[in-house]
Amino acid sequence: MEHRWSPRRYLEGEVTMHYSPVGSFPAVLRDISLGGMFIETGDTALPLNAPVVVSLVLRDQDELSPHRLHAMVVRTAEEGAGLMYIDAGAETLQPLRRWLATPHEVPPAVAAAQAAP
């Protein structure tokens, strides 16, 4: 059973992860919400409850703005990790909230997977 505070949206993009024991590494953002995100981590396995930092760029009102989000691993999967934000500030949540409120085209394969029971 999922316990989400806000709906998640598909968003594919490159991010940089930092996990102290392994340092920084590239990863792929798959979906995002006001409370967290799912990241494909490639060959880097992250343990449950691990503190991480995610660096990403959000487009906000036709401007690109870099952000660093402190998060904790709350779910692990073969392909990556589900993260929950820790201390996300208004300077990040406001542009994220605007982005989430704007309609975006979802690739057909993703839309079909989201609609499946």
Image (spheres, rainbow, N blue to C red):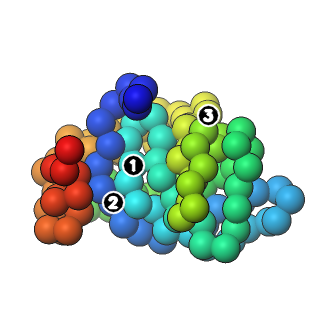
Amino acid carrying label 3: it is Ile
Q: Position of residue 95 (x, y in %)?
A: 35, 44
Q: Earlier in the sequence, mark 2 or mark 1?
A: 2
Q: Residue at x 40, y 31 (%)?
A: 2
Where, quadrant-wise, is the C terminus in this rendering?
top left
Contact, mark 2 vs mark 1 (Cβ under 8 Å): yes
Amino acid carrying label 1: it is Ile
Q: Which mark is residue 11?
A: 2
Q: Position of residue 106 (x, y in %)?
A: 18, 62
Image: 25 above or below 92: below
Q: Position of residue 104 (x, y in %)?
A: 16, 57
Q: How many marks?
A: 3
Q: Position of residue 29 (x, y in %)?
A: 46, 62
Q: Residue at x 61, y 31 (%)?
A: 87
Where, quadrant-wise, is the N terminus in this rendering?
top left
Mark-to-mark CA distance, 2 and 1: 7 Å
Q: Is residue 29 left or right of residue 75?
A: left
Q: Is residue 2 left or right of residue 26?
A: left
Q: Determine which quarter of the picture holds residue 21.
A: bottom right
Do we see residue 59 in this rendering? no
Q: Which residue is mark 3?
A: 86
Q: Determine which quarter of the picture holds residue 96.
A: top left
Q: Is residue 50 left or right of residue 104?
A: right
* Disc 3, SS: loop
* Disc 1, SS: strand
Q: Residue at x 34, y 31 (%)?
A: 6
